Amino acid sequence: MRIAILASNFIRIPPELPFIPKGYSGAPEKIMSIITEGLVKRGHDVTLFASGDSQTSAKLISVTDKSISMDPLIAQHLHNKFEHLLISKCYKMAQNNQFDIIHSTFDILSAYYAQLVAIPTISTLHSPLGGSVQKILSQLNDTQFYVSISNAQRAPLPHLKYAATIYHGIDVKNFVYSESKNNGYMINVGRIMPEKGITVAINVANKLKKRLYLLGTGVEDSDFWKKDIFPHINNNVTTQVGLVNKDELNNYYANAKLFLFPIQWEEPFGLVMVESMACGTPVIAYARGSVPELIKDGETGFIVNSSDEDVRGDWIIKKTGIEGLREAVERIYAMPEDMYRKMRRACRAHTEKNFTIERMIDQYEALYTQILAKK
């Protein structure tokens, strides 16, 4: 198939240090890079629309020499203008019948253009579907085929034209699996922002006197950072490590006792949970967003209801909120060695079965074929 992958000008593909600006995860760019390279390996004619400094085995089409986030001459408020420039270039080529299908990382922006060409567009929805996104997409329901990255993501817009739910996949062999080696610490990976529940994780760590490493960046000049995070880090319990390269991150995952993820929002997927489980490290998380779809309660970690008023399931841990998180953490630390090793094996097996690149590419290929057959 002739496939256009419509990525972004903002972050270089693939998104590696130092090309990820502070406050961003690079997760959507990582997934689109994985999809691009996987499709090329399978023999498809793939064109990637991304920044000029991107690295890919596909044909690269750009409108900027380097990613906008790395260009001091382009103000961030001009970001969307350059995205439109890239997107319009893609759809101009589609008008000239250069592709069979377009796969977009954008939810709204490509929806404006997709209705203007006969070539079908698939949009992978990487963000939550509330607020202005909900209002706009409800009026652009039929312009694209939408792929949700979890079933939970669909809740705000249940009537959107969904073509499939396809979970993100990772190259599992690139994540070092460790069955027993761990240094007894907890980790939290991701952007340091209120929605990620960082203050809750710090609270749990302090109460239990368990070492916690924060791997991610925040906006250091924000009130949240100054008032809620900075006073509580780099002490004998919580340490901010910051962004690290993939090899260092791998080691932190593999050597952790558990991953603590008390999210405060409806996380559409949570790729970091999958990466942690790939290394054998169980996850403790609030039952929000995609968490119940990704974690097997009691097998690859524990799911905890965030409050008595927000009960999402009948989980093993009956307490809710911080008390539930504390009980879950204590359970894992108190596990006999053989039971803990069994949980780590289950984490790896769960990832290998459900969250691989191969499975993800298989599903996208099947979806492309299905949509083109109905054209």
Image: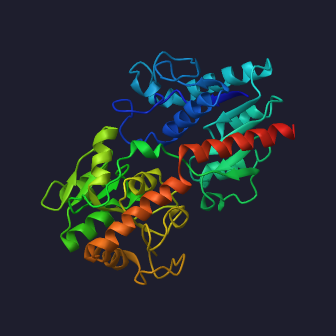
Q: Of all residues shown, which one is farthest toward the right?
A: 374
Question: Residue 217, can we see it?
Answer: no
Q: Of all residues shown, which one is farthest toward the left?
A: 236
Quick check: 297 above or below 85?
below
Q: Nearer the viewer, residue 334 or 290?
A: 334
Residue 223, how many percent across, how many down? 30, 52
Q: Considering the image in quadrants, where does the N terminus appear?
A: top right
- Identify the image quadrant of residue 181: bottom left
Quick check: 203 above or below 270?
below
Q: Please report the residue visible at 76 percent of the width from the left and 23 percent of the height from the top.
A: 94
Q: Nearer the viewer, residue 237 or 278?
A: 278
Q: Please report the residue visible at 37 percent of the width from the left and 58 percent of the height from the top.
A: 280
Residue 205, how many percent across, how many down? 24, 67
Quick check: 13 above or below 226?
above
Residue 281, how many percent across, how many down? 35, 60
Q: Please report the residue visible at 56 percent of the width from the left and 24 percent of the height from the top.
A: 82
Q: Report whether 55 appears left or right of 199.
A: right
- Identify the image quadrant of residue 239: bottom left
